[in-house]
Amino acid sequence: MKASFIRIAALIAAASAFTPVARAADVAHKFLGVDNKTNNLIYVDQTNTKNNWTTSIPGGSRDLQVIDGKEVLVSHGNGAGLYDLATGKKLWAIDSFKGINTARRTADGKTLLGGHGQGGICIYTVDSKGKTLSTLVLKGLRDLRLMRRLKDGNILLTVAKPYRVIEVDAKGKIVWQAKIPGKGYKAVRLPCGNTLVSTAGAVKVVEIDTAGKVVASVGGKDAHPKLLLDCFSGFDTLKNGNIVVANWLGHGNQGKGQHLIEFDRKNKVVWTWGDHKIAKVLTNMLILDDVRQASTTAAAAPAAGDWVNLFDGKTLTGWTNPYTWGKASVVDGEIHLTTTKRKFFLTTAKQYADFIFEVEVKMPEGKSNSGFMFRCHRKPNRVFGYQAEVDPSDRKWSGGLYDEGRRGWLHPNKKKKETIEAFRKNAGECFKRDGWNKYRIECVGDRLKISVNGVQTTDFKDSTDAQGYLALQHHGEKGKIYRFRNIRVKVLKPAKE
């Protein structure tokens, strides 16, 4: 079990050492919560309570999903609703279903609704108007709470009886399952392949390996006899490896215990929240920031030469779409780009001068093309400038340098066959058509370098642009999903204001 803790901490982040119960002055969170006693959606900002809000929602609400850092999707017993994250204002709703417990928005704008139907668990795919596009029936299965769609399209959920966590494919076939100690609520897949599951009566979040063995857990009444642990429901994982879980107080314990409890990987309590004036019974929650020291002083800007993550894995903060078409969304820790019209670019909000930029991309099947803009410029419905080519075609020009919207190809030179032959000989096999590909772009003065999966593909001098934005491209193929992750930058020389 100890080895398991070390492994996960290495994959997510090294867990910090905390005292058994942190003081309110030591840890502060921003979070969403579903109160299924009062039928309220709440937002709490412990760093600035002026931002707090509460809004009424329909009964049977359980699931939460933040969309693009601006909105939150909430499942209702009769469907789902979309709410403004800043104010709690209702923006959209589907209300023609029954027995819904979970809702997930997909990258193409559709919504998955899961609940109990005739013959078993039913998972509906609906469009923006609530029209049912397809129905998947998991025959003979019951007691669905929350479901999670995995990167390969499979769905992870808990069922009864016997109490299990299962993974089903697009046809509803069980492709993996494992026993859990009691009724399950939420299950998520970790980067290492293990699965975290919250269990109600056992009041534990257990980690299960691919062989179905419980290798670690947090919570448990025996381990925490002084806490009133009632029933574990929704939970969230933090980048430092900690787990924050909703302690559902619906078994006659209203007003007595803590609504939310944060555990480190050694099962020590780091933080609790139990404001019974704001909430009665929380059935689910989402943390909207990382663990940090509460302070009224703004955080110091990163020093020159430090790596800075440009994507937090949850929101699109720091990114903008200058086009009136194209959609960017966050799905399972990735940025997904889709479009129904033509190509577009998602750009950073900030400009950069000298830097090292790293990013990973995975292309859709079939005809596609992409690129990473750097030191680029933007106008309404237009982005132009330097681009590192992403070319999965037989041409094999991935890692080449293109001047989007201006001069065209810079390297290789289309007019000189010898440069094309030399480029393909050096870089033609570095791009993995069906896998993730890591790009590294270095700009220092007029020297521009591009590497793909560790192979330097371009070393070119050009002084046209000294600074500009970074951007991700969707080439315009309708319905295709372009995926990006692990996006970071190291500033060597800041851009001028």
Image: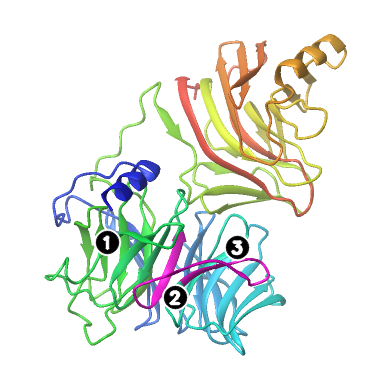
Q: What secondary structure prevails in the magenta region?
A: strand
What are the residue bounds of the magenta stretch?
Answer: 165-188
Q: On the image, which quarter does residue 372 sit in?
A: top right
Q: Is residue 177 magenta?
A: yes
Query: Where in the figure is residue 29, as x and y percent of width and height?
Result: 30, 55
Q: Which residue is mark 2?
A: 62
Query: Where in the figure is residue 165, as x and y percent of width and height?
Result: 46, 70
Element class at badge 3: loop
Residue at position x 28%, y 72% from top? Answer: 203
Q: Which residue is mark 3?
A: 154
Is residue 259 visible in the rendered structure shown here? yes
Mark closer to the observer (1, 2): 1
Element class at badge 1: strand
The type of residue carrying mark 1 is: Val
Residue at position x 16%, y 67% from top? Answer: 224
- Considering depth in this image, is 49 or 267 the residue closer to the camera? 267
- Lower position in the chain sequence, tag 3 or tag 2: 2
Query: Where in the figure is residue 74, as x and y percent of width and height?
Result: 49, 71
- Considering depth in this image, is 141 or 357 the residue closer to the camera? 141
Q: Which residue is mark 1?
A: 218
Q: On the image, which quarter does residue 174 sit in?
A: bottom right
Picture layout, residue 11 above or below residue 464: below
CA separation, marks 1 and 3? 26 Å
Query: Where in the figure is residue 135, as x and y percent of width and height?
Result: 68, 77
